[in-house]
Amino acid sequence: MRIGDAKQSYEADEAIWTSQTQKLWLGLFLLILLVFPFVVDSYLLYLGCLVGIAVISTTGLNILTGFTGLISLGQAGFMGVGAYTVAWLSINTALPFPVTLVLAGLMAAAVGILVGLPSLRVKGLYLAIATLAASVFLHFIFAEWESVTGGMGGLSLEPAHLFGLAFQSDFMMYFIIVPLAVLMVMAARNVFRTRIGRAFIAIRDRDISAEILGINLLRYKLMSFALSSFYAGVAGGLFAYFYRVVTPESFPLSMSIFYLAAVIVGGMGNLLGGILGAAFMTLVPEALKLLTAALTPFYPNAPVFMSPMLEIIFGALIVGFLIFEPHGLAEIWHRIRRFFRLWPFRN
Amino acid sequence: MDWLFFGEISLAGLAMGGLYALIALGFVIIYKATRVINFAIGEIMMFAAYLFLAFAGGMEMSPWIALPLAVIGGSILGGVIEKTMIRPMLGESPISVVMVTIGIASILVGLVEFIWTADPQLLPNFLPREPVFIGELYLAPKIAYGFLIGSVLLVIYLLYFRFSRGGVALRATASDQAAAYSMGINVRRVFNMAWVFGSLAASLAGVLVAATGGLSPQFGIIGLSVLVVVIVGGLDSILGALVAGVFIGWLETVAGAYLGGEYRMPATFLVLAVILVIRPYGLFGTHEIERV
């Protein structure tokens, strides 16, 4: 603990940025994000965009699972709803991307509310399985409703556009994805300073007690579902603009598990954790690819073993973090910060 | 409507449902004793089936030796998983424990791909080939004999849990852990045995299902059908696992035959959704009352 940290007012206690140093580091980080696309090669730029999309979706799932305590295995399905909405709108209308992305989010939120409806009657693992059922139905709809979704072949769409400017390259997409990610994480941070966010946390800690305290469970649970799937929908919409093709196989069940894993590895109920987890889980496969490429001259068989290794590492990360570091990367981050702050003393 | 066709499809579905019931029984045993929802059950089945492939195909053992060996291998795997990865999670929130089993599933898929590659494989045929007729209805021999072997184990299990010491210990632990502990039951051992027995049932079913439908690292997806079965039947009900297993197996096969393969999952998940809304604890499950 830092000494002399006593807060004098409620506002000071609720402030997001408590010190000048913090603001300085944040400014530096934003500056790096801004300069990043100008200095790196196309591969890193591509990764940056992927991480941005993953951060949005993970933050959404974190709101639902980490802060409200409702497990969802439907995140990929909600992203699919957003992606198909964007694809359909960009094919059939001339709306610019800010409108289509918001509509994608709203569409996903509507589906999220529908899926969340059983959440008053069922909870915990039963709810996880209800969302699993929802993702099965959504996948079925994506594959079978051919007049809208293009069936198994999917849809291909035009690049995102605004004021006649087409966002064709990864470089330009970066300037949509990353600012949006920053904005949405900040929005999430602010939600948890309001009555709504605190109601979510109360529900997570003990839903029956929360109800006794006067929190309308159904309303807030649905709100959490809506908010979380809005994030997923926007992330899905960005996904559609980024790859410019959407098929039912773009959003498999394993993707939902991926985001759940990102929330856990990052740290449940911690927005910083969501960011770290999303970045980490996106970059691990890429690091493995680099490692494989480096090993191939010595072991020609290395590429064959990459995909199984990836499965093993993915599983081992989930199990390992849950057993040894249940608070995730965020806790490791805090520990490192504490070390420097207290240096040369320990703890 | 062609009643003969319907009858044959139904029969095949019911036989498949018998195997689902066996897997679901394994799932319910684990849940009853340890309150862990095991998302890795499909992967444990898969692992046992690959072991069978290795023993019977690779080492050319007689299938009737390879089958018990594979099943024992699968149950040891269950025991090891419990000891090393589930035990440390004791007392953690159910979300975390479920995620651990999902992680285990991913590790097992990776291991299988590592050892046996990702290509689909066929198991050596070890079941009799003569077609089976029940009245006028034809039933594929693999399915029929698979059902027969599965049912034998199912009956043994039911009798074991009803009458043996170990079975009583398991049921006592399921109904009240603290009381069981104070009566001198070794609860840790019961936990471990539950995983061993649960995986044993799953492993046998895994080999039998793989013998009829082939084997690949995606085999574990069958775990999703089993999940539907146990939720519909009630997570902690053995009777529910049997009834729902047979019903879901039948429904899946009939939906697949009449509407097309892509309707199999939506049909069963529709039943699941309806059950979740009207009877969340399943047809035969215990309705737990939660208090603050």
Image (cartoon, coloured by chain):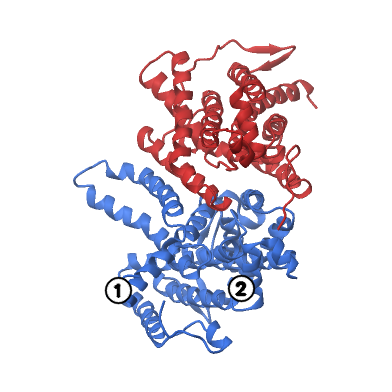
Which chain hosts label 2? A
Disc 1 residue type (three-letter)? Phe
Give the letter of the blue chain. Answer: A
User: Is residue B181 found left or right of B63 in the rendered image?
Assistant: right
Q: Residue at x 39, y 38 (%)?
A: B111
Q: In the rendered image, which quarter is residue A277 located in?
A: bottom left
Q: Nearer the viewer, residue B251 or B24?
A: B24
Residue A149 is situated, as x and y percent measured from the top left of the image, at 62, 56
Q: Nearer the viewer, residue A152 or B185?
A: B185
The N terminus of chain A: image quadrant: bottom left
Residue A55 is situated, as x and y percent measured from the top left of the image, at 48, 67
* Whether residue A91 can be seen here: no
Q: Which mark is residue B203?
A: none
Tag 2: Cα neighbours inside 10 Å, few (<14), some, or many (≥20)? Answer: some
Identify the secondary structure beneath mark 1.
Answer: loop
Q: Colour of chain B?
A: red
In the rendered view, tell whether residue A189 sits above or below residue A208.
Answer: below
Q: Residue at x 51, y 59 (%)?
A: A245
Disc 2 residue type (three-letter)? Val
Q: In the rendered image, which quarter is residue B160 located in?
A: top right
Instruction: Measure how far apart labels 2 and 1 are at the Cα level.
Output: 50 Å
User: Is residue A256 found left or right of A335 in the rendered image?
Assistant: right
The C terminus of chain A: image quadrant: bottom left
Question: Are the residues flagged by discs 2 and 1 from a single subunit?
Answer: yes
In the rendered view, tell whether residue B27 sits above or below residue A64.
Answer: above
Query: Where is mark 1, residue-wise?
Result: A345
Q: Residue at x 71, y 37 (%)?
A: B233
Q: Which mark is residue A102?
A: 2
Tag 1: Cα neighbours inside 10 Å, few (<14), some, or many (≥20)? Answer: few
* Whether residue A119 can be seen here: yes
Identify the secondary structure beneath mark 2.
Answer: helix
